[in-house]
Amino acid sequence: MNCHKEKIIAISNIIHIVLLTVSILSAIVGFLKIFAYAWSLAGLYGEVFIIDNVPVVLPSFLSIGGTNVFYWASGEMNAWGFGLESTLRVVTVVASLFTAERMFKYLKSGESPFSAVVIRWFKYFAWTQFILAFATNVISSMFPIILLVLVYIFEYGGSLQEESDTTL
């Protein structure tokens, strides 16, 4: 039993670090994307880049050594698209990564997978996945539905764990 808990803690520690790093980087790219979208909507002066086959004006005052700092993120913006829909997708992705990171943070600290706090973050993660899948592709929403079923299985396991702990 203790061996399984140590494995969960070790794996959760690695996943937590990866998710924390990816969520921070995604938040930075997302902020740049939202800022660039707002800058383009406002019609302010800057350099023109082509992102997702859309000419986008990015601020030229952030140029360092002749290279715009937004240029490095334009490839990532192109992969995620550009506009209001893709901006909402970025926000949902960052929220999803954050909720998963929180869940693994508690698991790495030794919390039981059936504890209320882990189940709560797991539920948030499943709902963000559902929103993301629904916003991108209705067919891919089966994965979040499976996650939601797993959440309810964990909630049931948590209630059984609590009942078992109180009867001993």
Image (tube, rainbow, N blue to C red):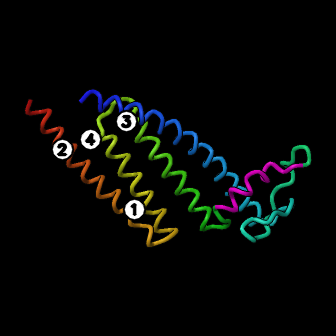
Which residue type does callout 1 highlight?
Phe
Which of discs 2 and 1 lies nearer the camera? The answer is 1
The 10 Å Cα crowd at callout 1, few under 14, some 14 to 19, many 20 or more, is: few
**Label 4: few (<14), some (14–19) or many (≥20) C-alpha neighbours in 10 Å:** many
* Residue 83 drawn at (x, y percent): 66, 67
Q: Which residue is under mark 2?
A: 159
Q: Amino acid at mark 2?
A: Ser
For label 3, the crowd category at 10 Å Cα-Cα, with few meaning under 14, some 14 to 19 and many 20 or more, is many
Q: Is residue 137 above or below residue 17?
A: below
Report crowding for label 2: few under 14, some 14 to 19, many 20 or more residues within 10 A (C-alpha): some
Kind of element beneath mark 3: helix
72 drawn magenta: yes
Sequence order check, earlier mark of 2 and 4: 4
Amino acid type at mark 3: Leu
Q: Residue at x 87, y 44 (%)?
A: 64
Residue underneath mark 1: 143
Q: How far apart in space, not on screen, are marks 2 and 4 (Cα)?
A: 8 Å
Q: Which residues are magenta?
A: 67-79
Task: Please state which of the two labelled residues, at mark 3 or mark 1, is closer to the viewer.
Answer: 1
In the image: residue 167, left or right of residue 158: left
Residue pointed to by mark 4: 114
Farthest right residue? 66
Q: Considering only order in the chain, which callout, 1 or 3, is on the residue closer to the N terminus?
A: 3
